[in-house]
Structures are given as structure tokens and as C-alpha cells.
Image: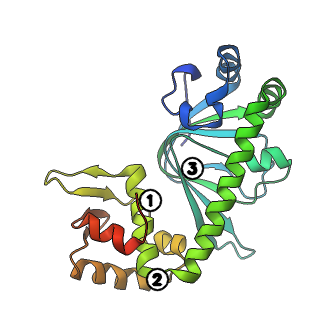
Amino acid sequence: MADCKPTHNCANCPSRQTTEWRDLSVDELKMVTRAKQTQTLDPGDTLYDQGDEGDGIFCIQSGLIGLRRLDEDGNSILLKLCSGGTTVGYRSFLSKQAHLNLAEVLNASVVCHIERPAVVRLLERNPRLGERFLRHAMEDLTAAEEAYAQSLTKSMKARFLHALMVLYERLGYQDESGHAALDLPIKRMELAELIGAQPESISRLIRSVESEGLLQIDDRRIQFRDMDAVLRHAGAQY
């Protein structure tokens, strides 16, 4: 259930420096503060539905948002995870087209919505803001191409461990035993969708990595038993 919160000062937002809003002046930040609406959202809530008009931009303060694509039969696939310090909905806003995806809240989240008139004024006043959104679009395109390349060249195991490392970067912590740990924020079926695997493949992968001593998995709690080996198998440096 969405719950409106008192508007906070954007200049003091801890997530701002990782967003397109980092280059705004003091006066421009005041414009955003006056124009935006801040909401606390629960798992299952949506920011927008597939096919909705892009009437503004959403800035995630905290939490986790999943972007889903629906087919004609109503089946969905999880395409991307967005955490604090990320803006979503900007492509539909800039292209003046309907949203291609559904944005669903996966973890309790705090999200700000900046309506179209305010964003248009900011773009007119500050060209660097538009440059930031263009760079964001290019980074998203590069990430999509990389994910496609990985689906063709990397093993299922490597993609599985890579996805867990991305989640750990955003949501991980050190548990009471001193190991790196992660409370998986999505279902195993959704994790399979992210890496292009069948749901039953995830169970086999879990048994495999546990038997190798890489991970210990208890329901959604994941403990990284050998982080160096996980990174090596994932085929990436973090």
C-alpha cells in the first residue's frame, strides 16, 4: 500500500550523488523538492504498468524495484533490478511513449515521483541533466548487450553466480560468523528469469555450488563460503 511521506529536501538526499540530479544547482534542487511526491511502497505495489503513459520520472531512495515485461497472455519475465540511487521511467518520459515494462516493488521501498512539467523545466534550464539521462540510456543499452552476450558465451553457473554478486553488491552484508551474506530479495523462479534459465535449473545449480563449498543456501539466506572462488567462477572482478 502506498503511503505518502512528508517531502524531504533533495539537497540532503543520500542517493542523489548517484543519480542524474547530482548536477542540479541549489535553486534547481528546490524546484525538485517542491514538485516531487515521496511515497513508501510495499512489495507488490507498482510504480507504473506496462502501457501507461510516461508522465514523470521515478527516483528510488531505497528498496528494490523489478522491471517486468508482460506478454499477450499475461505472463511476465523479470528483466532488471533497480535499487536505491536509480531513476526509472525516464526512457518513456523522454521518448513520450508508453512504458514498455511494468515496475513492481520487490522490497519495501521509498520512491520519489517528479512530474513531467517540473522535469521539462529542469531540462530547459540545465543541459547537463539531459546529458546525464542520455548517458544513463547508453549504459542501460550496454548492460543489455552484455547480458545478451553472457547468455550466449557464459555457462549457466557463471551467470547464476554473477547475478548473486550483483545482488550482493547492492544488498549484501557480513553475518555473525564473518562471512559475506545476502538475503535473496526475489524468488528462485525470478532469479531464473534474470539469467535466462529454467526454474528447475536453479535447484540443480544450488546443489552444485553447495557441494563445491562456494555457497551455503538456507531458503533465501545465502552465505558466500569462498568469495574468491565465487568471483573466479562468475568470470568478473568486483
Quadrant of the rendered image containing residue 74: bottom right
Say the numbered circle drawn on residue 166: 1
SS of the residue at dot 2? loop
Q: Tell me where residue 132 sits by quadrant.
A: top right
Q: Residues within 10 Å of mark 2 (few under 14, many from 20)?
A: few
Q: Amino acid at mark 3?
A: Asp
Q: Residue at x 16, y 53 (%)?
A: 178
Q: Quadrant of residue 69?
A: bottom right
Disc 1 or 3, which lies upstream in sequence?
Answer: 3
Pair 1/3: label in front: 1
Nearest to viewer (mark 3 / mark 2): 2
| Dot 1 alpha-carbon crowd within 10 angstroms: few under 14, some 14 to 19, many 20 or more | few
Checking the image for residue 45, the label placed there is 3
Residue found at x 82% / y 25%: 121
Which amino acid, by three-letter code, is at mark 1? Val
- Picture layout, residue 184 above or below residue 39: below
Where is residue 51 drawn, in percent x and y?
78, 57
Residue at position x 75%, y 74% from top? 72
Residue on which the image places disc 2: 155
Q: Secondary structure at mark 3?
A: loop
Question: Quick one: label 3 or label 2, which is nearer the N terminus?
Answer: 3
Instruction: Name the outermost residue toward the top.
Output: 27
Q: Nearer the viewer, residue 94 or 190?
A: 94
Is 122 in front, or is 46? 122
The circle drawn on residue 80 is none
Residue 89 shows up from this direction: no
> For the C terminus, which image quadrant?
bottom left
